[in-house]
Amino acid sequence: MSELQAALLAIGAGVMLVVYLYGWWQQRRLSRKFGTAFKASHADALYQENPVKSVPPVQHILAAAPSEPFASEAEVLPPDDGAAVMPNVQDEACALLDGRSDFIIDLHLHEPAAGAVLGGFWQRKFDFGKPVHVCGLTLHTRRWERVIAESQTLYVSLRIGLQLVDRGGVISATKLADFRDLILGVTRQIQAEATVADPTAAHAQAVELDALCAQVDQMVGINLVPPGERLLPCSRIAQAAALQGMRLESDGAFHLFNEQGQSLFSLTNHDTKPFQHHTLATASSPGITLLLDVPRVAQPALQFDLMTRVARDLAQELQLNLVDDQRVVLSAVGLDRIRAQIAEVEAQMTDNGIVPGSVQARRLFS
């Protein structure tokens, strides 16, 4: 070995030793600085057990340095302990994140960071065809809140949830895998630790949830039509609807709202043309339809009772007949049969952990 080779080996060994010692010193310094902030003695407020189905298994992934591949597995992160304040969920969307309806990835940051730490994720947030929510556990208040790219608050943990099911159907396995790869790519860049649900199990469970939603996704209608070929002036329809406390909304239908501002049921034009404020005085209609969106209202059987009473009042006020889709007059027996079917749907939803009219139900049936 030449003197030059020996000198180069000695220099290389020295550099490696310096890098190792510097990394050890940095890790020890950061542990002192942030160790206390990352400890808490609470259960995670965002995770809720589902009484019907278990949450898909999770994989705990330790992100390697950017130049190295991901480790296939890492040890489970130690539980937090020592926080003085129990965390609180400030954002409704964060409180609703659930392993049954969402694919959830938890990021445990080595250093507190603002929303911008997710970098390129923000540009691709809308690429997956389903709602995505980002929530962060704040450094100082220890509360979970919604995170946006511009958030300046410092967070110690981030939770990213991709909704799996809505009225558009279930997310594809390909998009789910793309979402996971995107988040893990960000995780590697920021050298965080991630807890990731198993995408295969999550997708299989989402398919089951979508099938359940398809079974209970029912819209019940009561048609009111004038006898013969008589048309209804839309101005009279508007007046009769107002007497029932209904008001015309931007979707072209009259709605009856509860105290929380949620629509209980709607009144639409029988020929599907939207009602519009500026044409009410001149337009006419062949009939009207009262619609109840069963999964999206609380106690739908009771709301059907209310809708039936309103239908009868409107029929009397406007001289109309209550008929089904084949224009057969609806009898009391027919209405009772419809109510029984609604009650069955309500029970099926409740038995499967989805309360009709709840925020989670309105989320799944949107």
Image: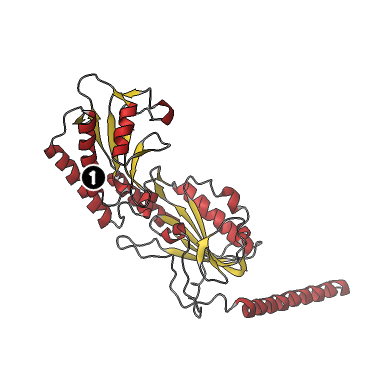
Please state the horizontal and vertical placement of residue 5, each as a whole percent of the image: 84, 71
Please state the horizontal and vertical placement of residue 333, each as a whole percent of the image: 11, 39
Q: How is the image coloured?
A: secondary structure
Q: Nearer the viewer, residue 331 or 183?
A: 331
Residue 156, image quadrant: bottom right
304 to the left or right of 9: left
Q: Which residue is mark 1?
A: 306
Q: Nearer the viewer, residue 111 or 362?
A: 362
Q: Nearer the viewer, residue 197 or 299?
A: 299
Asked if one can make out residue 269 in the rendered structure from this viewpoint, the answer is no
Residue at (67, 79) in percent of width and height? 29
Helix, strand or loop under label 1: helix
Residue at (60, 70) in percent of width and height? 110
Please state the horizontal and vertical placement of residue 213, each as a whole percent of the image: 32, 47
34 to the left or right of 200: right
Quarter of the C terminus within the rendering: top left
Relative height, residue 321 to residue 348 (above, below)? above
Residue ranking furthest to the left: 333
Residue at (48, 47) in percent of width and height? 174
Q: Amino acid at mark 1?
A: Leu
Q: Nearer the viewer, residue 109 or 46?
A: 46
Quarter of the N terminus within the rendering: bottom right
348 to the left or right of 185: left
Residue at (40, 57) in percent of width and height? 201
22 to the left or right of 215: right
